[in-house]
């Protein structure tokens, strides 16, 4: 017997991933970061772009982030990696006042949980015009450089921000990053591309929408939040 998806009536903490969640997949801001990561790997390991790409994606899948793989396998310092890969053009992001208004009306706290850096979070939220709606950010530094989907990272987040998972909802663009939140008791929402424009993602990154740990799926986060507020 299939269980009913968890609902939102009891939620008092709203947890959001950043990249490809709070802005549309087709903006492809991550494509810029992705390219910078490839350049970093190529320069550090002195390999060509094709080999760097292979290593980058292998580490991303095995370690959760390419940075973690580069740290573990090659002694890279996180500060050097983050400073390089997040030096991107944020101008493709446009203000989203409708989403900001919906987030503001959600009852309770709103938090960011990301594998990116707090500086990157600040730049993205500023461009979207929604920075003032969040009560805290848990980034890769707060995670002590251990990225999602590691269980210990969610445990640290819950402790640091005094989160009751059974009264929380998590919004993410990668299904695998919702496994632990669901196990902890969170209501989970997978944010997927809307299908109107091409997105630059690996096939596995777009998988999992039918998995049992995904309670809800949306290709329109703003509309989804507006419907929650209205309800």
Image: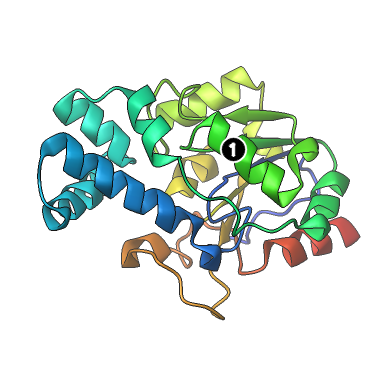
For the residue carrying disc 1, how many other residues have a C-alpha within 10 Å: few (<14), some (14-19), or many (20+)?
Answer: many
* Dot 1: element: helix
Kindly identify which residue carries mark 1. 121
Q: Closer to the camera, 172 or 84? A: 84
Query: Can I make out residue 207 in this image?
Result: no
Q: Is residue 103 above or below residue 212?
A: above
Percent x, y of residue 191 = 57, 61
Query: Can I make out residue 135 in this image?
Result: yes
Q: Is residue 50 above or below residue 43?
A: below
Q: Closer to the camera, 70 or 47? A: 47
Q: Closer to the camera, 218 or 1? A: 218
Percent x, y of residue 189 = 60, 56
Q: Disc count in the image?
A: 1
Percent x, y of residue 31 = 41, 58
Tell me: 46 left or right of 85. left
Task: Look at 79% across and 39% down and name the residue there.
Answer: 133
Q: Is residue 225 above or below residue 46?
A: below
Percent x, y of residue 85 = 39, 40
Quadrant including the C terminus: bottom right
């Amino acid at each position: 017997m299939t269980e009913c998806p968890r609902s939102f009536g009891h939620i008092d903490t709203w947890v959001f991933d950043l990249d490809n969640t709070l802005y549309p997949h087709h903006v492809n801001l991550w494509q810029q970061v992705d390219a910078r990561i490839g350049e970093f790997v190529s320069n550090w390991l002195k390999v060509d772009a094709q080999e760097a790409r292979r290593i980058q994606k292998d580490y991303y899948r095995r370690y959760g982030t390419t940075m973690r793989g580069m740290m573990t396998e090659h002694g890279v310092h996180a500060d050097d990696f983050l400073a390089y890969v997040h030096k991107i053009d944020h101008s493709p992001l446009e203000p989203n006042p409708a989403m900001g208004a919906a987030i503001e009306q959600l009852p309770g706290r709103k938090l960011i949980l990301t594998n990116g850096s707090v500086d990157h979070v600040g730049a993205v939220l500023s461009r979207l015009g929604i920075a003032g709606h969040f009560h805290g950010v848990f980034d890769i530094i707060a995670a002590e450089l251990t990225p999602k989907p590691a269980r210990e990272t969610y445990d640290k987040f819950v402790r640091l921000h005094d989160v009751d998972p059974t009264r929380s909802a998590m919004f993410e663009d990668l299904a695998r990053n919702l496994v632990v939140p669901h196990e902890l008791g969170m209501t989970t929402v997978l944010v997927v591309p809307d299908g109107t424009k091409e997105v630059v993602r690996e096939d596995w990154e777009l998988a999992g929408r039918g998995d049992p740990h995904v309670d809800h799926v949306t290709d329109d986060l703003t509309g989804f939040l507006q419907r929650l507020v209205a309800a």
